Amino acid sequence: MEALVLMYHQIVPDGAPDGWVPAPLADPRYGVTRLEFARQMTYLREEGYTLLPLGALFSGETAEIPRASASGRPAVVVTFDDGYASDLALAMPILARLGIPATFFVTTGHIGAPGMLSEKGVAELAARPLFRIGGHGESHRFLSELSESECRSELVASFDRIRTLTGQETAEMSAPGGRTSPLVAALARRAGFLALATSRPGLHYPAADPFFLPRLPILRRHTFRDFSALLDPRSRTHRVNEWIRSAKQAARSALRILSPGKGG
């Protein structure tokens, strides 16, 4: 069945001022408050959305799941990028209470830094059957802008540390900044990852390439009405969001061609 993969970052404590971030890596635009996150997850559960673990999209586990209801709604997958301490402290209790699976993509070189998950926190999340740890690079550098050898080193180091900390024999990967390429996808596969999540707009369809997995970022500026509309691919809100994101990514790609070697 079709699936919409949601991309979260840091969950912000209630009462934190606008612009608050837990760590230098964090972008305040991605800081969803704990209260709003709880409301969003409760809505998914109460409205009867099919909530899948990420691995179900490419492991064949969806074979026994009926296609979306008559409304045509896609299934929903919840993911987090970067590996903030709020994954464990704020997001996990809400997800566990509602029985919602999630994958936490961790920047392994930032584990233990202020505001980031500790080694113990990573292991604690991985020990819960609902949750899974994925890779988000070693340093959070944009993989598509690295040399082949640097990219390979980032991916291998990330995968090895995840296995060491969690005991997982497999893992999925999320490209930092959503920056990827056919070479990055090939190197991620060779490093042992099962999939590569991007920030490309769109739905994931059965038999689609798991190494170019599209996702929908959920931002601080999104109201609850925005959130519910974004879940519907037929809504004007969803279509406009896809158009804007596609235009921005095309412009960014054009700038990289004109200015090779510069970061984005």
Image (spheres, rainbow, N blue to C red):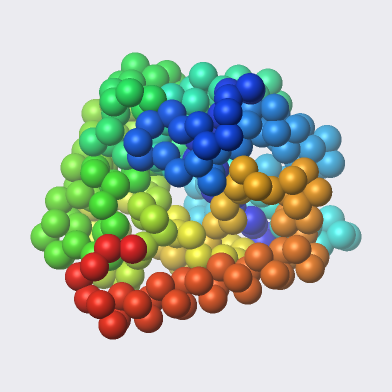
- Taking depth in this image into account, of 79 and 32 the one nearest to the observer is 32
Quarter of the image where one finds residue 13? top right
**For residue 154, side relative to residue 134 (left or right):** left
Quarter in which the N terminus is drawn: bottom right
- Taking depth in this image into account, of 61 and 262 the one nearest to the observer is 262
Residue at (63% x, 27% y) in the render: 34
Q: Is residue 47 above or below residue 234?
A: above
Residue 60 visible in the displayed image: no
Quarter in which the C terminus is drawn: bottom left
Residue at (27% x, 59% y) in the render: 143
- Taking depth in this image into account, of 77 and 167 the one nearest to the observer is 77
**For residue 4, side relative to residue 165 (left or right):** right
Residue at (63% x, 52% y) in the render: 62
Residue 101: x percent and y percent? 59, 35
Q: Is residue 25 above or below residue 200?
A: above
**For residue 219, side relative to residue 153 (left or right):** right
Residue 90 visible in the displayed image: yes
Residue 201: x percent and y percent? 57, 66
Q: Is residue 44 above or below residue 237?
A: above
Residue at (39% x, 20% y) in the render: 121
Residue 105: x percent and y percent? 41, 41
Quarter of the image where one finds residue 168? top left
> How many discs mark residues in the rendered view?
0
Residue 57: x percent and y percent? 55, 54
Q: Residue furthest left?
A: 149
Q: Is residue 168 above or below residue 259?
A: above
